[in-house]
Image: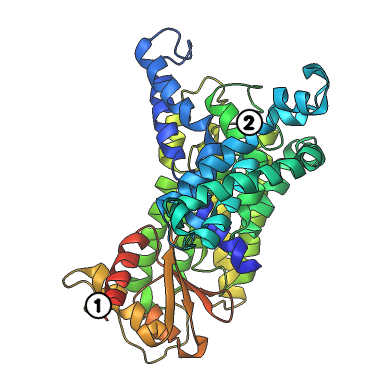
Amino acid sequence: MMKYLQRLGRSLMLPVAVLPAAAILMGIGYWIDPSGWGAGSPIAAFLIKAGGSIIDNMAILFAVGVALGMSKEKDGSAALSGLVAYLVVTTVLSTGSVAMLQGVDVAEVNAAFGKIGNQFIGILSGIIASMMYNRFSHVKLPDALSFFSGKRLVPIMTSVAMLVVSLVLLFVWPVIFTGLVNFGKSISELGAIGAGLYGFFNRLLIPIGLHHALNSVFWFDVAGINDIGNFWASKGEQGVTGMYQAGFFPVMMFGLPAAALAMYHTAKTAKKKQVAALMMAAGVASFFTGVTEPLEFAFMFVAPVLYFTHAVLTGLSLTVAALFHWTAGFGFSAGFVDFVLSLKIPIANQPYMLIVQGLVFAVIYYFLFRFIITKFNLMTPGREEDIDEETEEGIVAGDKFAAMAAKIYEGLGGDANVTSVDNCVTRLRVEVKDMKAVDQKRIKATGVPGINVVGPQSIQVIVGTNVQFVADEVEKLRKKR
C-alpha cells in the first residue's frame, strides 16, 4: 500500500511541475499592471489570463498526469483516458445533471456538486484511468471488434468504469466534500496556529511522499481554501490569502541553506571539500527554486532528530508569517524565483518582511543545527566513520552523468538485481530483487545526498534536480545489456 501511495505522490509531481509556467506568466502580468490586475494593459491581461488557464484547470492536469504516471508503460493512451475519465464524471455529476437525476430544482442540489471539478476528482480520474490501462491495454478482442483491441479499448473501458464511479459519487461525494471542508476549516479556523500545524505536518510527511495529499487540501480548491489559486488570482483577504505558502519562504530561502552551512562546518576536515560541493548545490537549489529534497534527504534518515527540528521550525515559520500577516505566494515552491514573481501580486502583503524573518531563521537554523549535531554527535554528511570505499574520482572526467549512472547502477546490483528504474523530481526510484545485493557504500561514493530504503525490494537514490539525466543514462545501460 505504501509503495502504491509513493507512486501516486511521484505522479502528482508531473502536473505540479507545470505550475511554474503559470507563476511566471501571471507574475510578469502583475508586474506590468500591479493595480489594474490586467484591466489597464492588454499585454498584462494576456499574460494573466494565460497563467490563469493553467491554475484554473489543475484538476484536468492532475487527471492526465496521474493517469500517465501510474500506468505501467507511461503511454499516451493512458493520459487520454485520464482526460476521458475526468470529463465523464464532471459532466454526469454537474449541478444540472444531478438536478435531473434527482428530479429536483437546480437550486436544491447539494453544493458539493458545484465543486465536482476539483483536484481530488482529477486524481481519482487519473487513478481509475491508469487501472483500466494496466488491465486492458493488451486485451485482444474477436476479429470483428479487433479495431478496438489493446490501447483503443482503454478509453472505452475507462468511460464505463467512470459511470459506475459517478453513481457511487452521487451518494458519497457530498459526504467526502463535507468531511474535507470540515477538516480544512478546523485547521483554518485556528488562524496562525493552524498554518503552523499545517507546515509541521507538511514536512513530516515528506519522507513517505504523502505531503502532496495534505497540500491539496490547503493549496488547491479541494476544501474551499485554494490558497495558491486565490493568491495568484488576487482573490480573498489581503494578509490572509497566502498564509499557507508565505512561511515556507524563510525556511527554503534562508533556513535550510543555513542548515547546510552548519553541516559543512561540523564535517571532518578531510571531508569538507566533498561536503562543500554537496551542501552548496543543495543549498542553492533550495534558495532559488525551493526544491529542498536534496538537502533534506542528506540528514533526514541519518539524523531524525534534526529533521524533526526542521519540521518544528517550519511550523513556527508559518505561524509567525501568518500571525503578522506577511504574505507571498508560489506557483511551484517557495524559492527566490517565485518570491520575486509574487511581489507585485496585488494581494501580497508586506512580502519583504519575509526576508527579515528569513534572516532571523537562518541564524536559528545555523546555531540550532550546529549545536544538535555536535551535542549528540550526529552522523551528518562528512561526519561518518572513516571506511574504505571508492571515491568520486573519475566522475568529473567525460560525461559525469553517465559515469555517475554507471557507478550507481553497479552499486544497485546491475542487470542481475535491478528490475525497474523510474524517477521523480529529485530521486531515482528503483525496484530490486534482493536488497542485500545493493552496495550502499558504492552508491554513496558517487556523492549523492542520500539513500532511502522504502521496502524489501524498493530503494530510492536521492540525486537532486539533475536526476532525469542520471535516470536516462541508467536506462541506456539497461538497454545495452
- In which image quadrant can residue 179 be found? top right
Tag 2: residue type?
Answer: Thr
Q: Position of residue 279 (x, y in %)?
A: 40, 63
Label 1, on which residue? 480
Tag 1: residue type?
Answer: Lys
* Mark 1 secondary-structure assignment: helix
**Label 2 to label 1, Cα distance in Å?**
47 Å
**Residue 255 in sight in this render:** no
Q: Nearer the viewer, mark 2 or mark 1?
A: 2
Q: Quadrant of the C terminus?
A: bottom left
How many residues crowd mark 2 within 10 Å: few (<14), some (14–19), many (20+)? some
- In which image quadrant can residue 411 be found? bottom left
Q: Residue furthest left?
A: 398
- In which image quadrant can residue 7 be found? bottom right
Instruction: Please say if 134 is above or below 91.
Output: below
Q: Position of residue 145 (x, y in %)?
A: 47, 52
**Residue 428 in sight in this render:** yes
Q: Position of residue 269 (x, y in %)?
A: 38, 77
Instruction: Please say if 105 is above or below 333.
Output: above
What numbered label is drawn on residue 283?
Answer: none
How many residues crowd mark 1 within 10 Å: few (<14), some (14–19), many (20+)? few
What numbered label is drawn on residue 91?
Answer: 2
Q: Residue furthest bottom?
A: 388
